[in-house]
Image: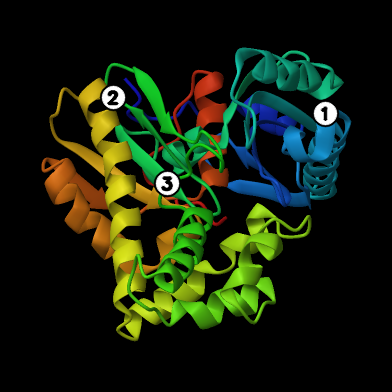
Amino acid sequence: MLYYVNLIEITEASVKLGCMDFFLGFDGGGSRTRAALCSRDGALQATAEAAGSNPHHAGWEGCARMLRSAFDQVITSVKAQGCGQVRICGAFFGLAGVSSPDERAQVAAIAHGWPELSNSSVGVDHDIRIAWAGALAGNPGVAIIAGTGSSAYGCNSAGESARCGGWGALLDDVGSGYWLAIEAIKAVTHGHDGRGEPTALREDVFGLLGVSQVESIPGAAHAPDMTRDRIATLAPAIFARAQGGDLIASQILERGARELARLAAALQARLFGGGAMEVALTGGLSGRKSYADLLRKALLEAAPSAQLVAPRHSSLAGAVILAALEAKHNLPPSVRFGF
């Protein structure tokens, strides 16, 4: 079971020695790495930020360097607050691009190579798991990440977990910012062919790609500087066009929401036997109320017994929650993380 229980108090002896036990969480993505150090009662002691640590972007040396940079910052900060000895009981690394057992083992080796973590319980997983832990406060349910990419992760009351989606931009990432943008670009080309209706998205696509005619789209879309992240920046325009009444933009968003709902439905079947469960939408697109509303509607069809809930905490908070679990402690349910 992953539900919370009361926390053991810090011993009087530890306080007298100026020594405290801490939990350390990492949220490492392609653009930035965040770290947080919390005491046993869940109180935040320090946070830090470094450049991205996704090993597929930064390389393994870069990954290790950015993780260490964030780690050094939080340790320096907490020592400056007067803590004589920093004892880390549990640490958890939630990193984008880390999925296979070999990749998780490599991150664990980096962590255990730090003297400060040599005797600590360390966990490593893909960042979707910390998104789930934060959004649902470590309780059973499913979290969907919809940002530049997309994926979903679920865990039931028996501790059984599974991941769905997240196979990358070429194969998957349904309902994500990148996927929505590609659908918009396709809609413009199809409209030009007569295979689809005209759309005001044509203007936005031309602006993104720097072209003035549809025939120039293929070359511009495959240019070296037209990265996945850059293409995904078209997503806000799709929401704006849909709000303005553009039918094609609205249909793209509806399809995206249905695809995200299918991720949740697949995990519901695998982990919850089709029964009731909570679903939280996280990631960059989670702040779009219109998208959350569309997902709620799509869930009624794909997974009627699922309930869409607002995320309780951040992904970084989720990493701290999992760090505590690595040390066989549960943070109290009253904790309100400030990060």
Q: Earlier in the sequence, mark 1 or mark 2?
A: 1
Q: What's the colour scheme?
A: rainbow
Q: Residue 156 carries which label?
A: 2
Seen at 13% across and 50% down, the residue is 300
Q: Nearer the viewer, mark 3 or mark 2?
A: 3
Mark 3 belongs to which amino acid?
Val
Query: Closer to the camera, 202 or 262?
Result: 202
**Percent from the top left, x then y, of residue 169?**
56, 43
Mark 2 belongs to which amino acid?
Asn
Query: Is 223 displayed left or right of 270 in the figure?
Result: right
Task: List the residue tagged with mark 1.
Answer: 60
Seen at 69% across and 76% down, the residue is 210
Q: In this view, does 254 lie above or below 17?
A: below
Q: What element carries label 2?
A: loop
Q: What element carries label 3?
A: loop
Which part of the image, by quadrant, shows the N terminus?
Answer: top left
Task: List the residue tagged with mark 3.
Answer: 174
Residue 261 appears anywhere in the view: yes
**Percent from the top left, x then y, of residue 157?**
26, 22
Which image quadrant for residue 24? top right
Which image quadrant for residue 273? top left
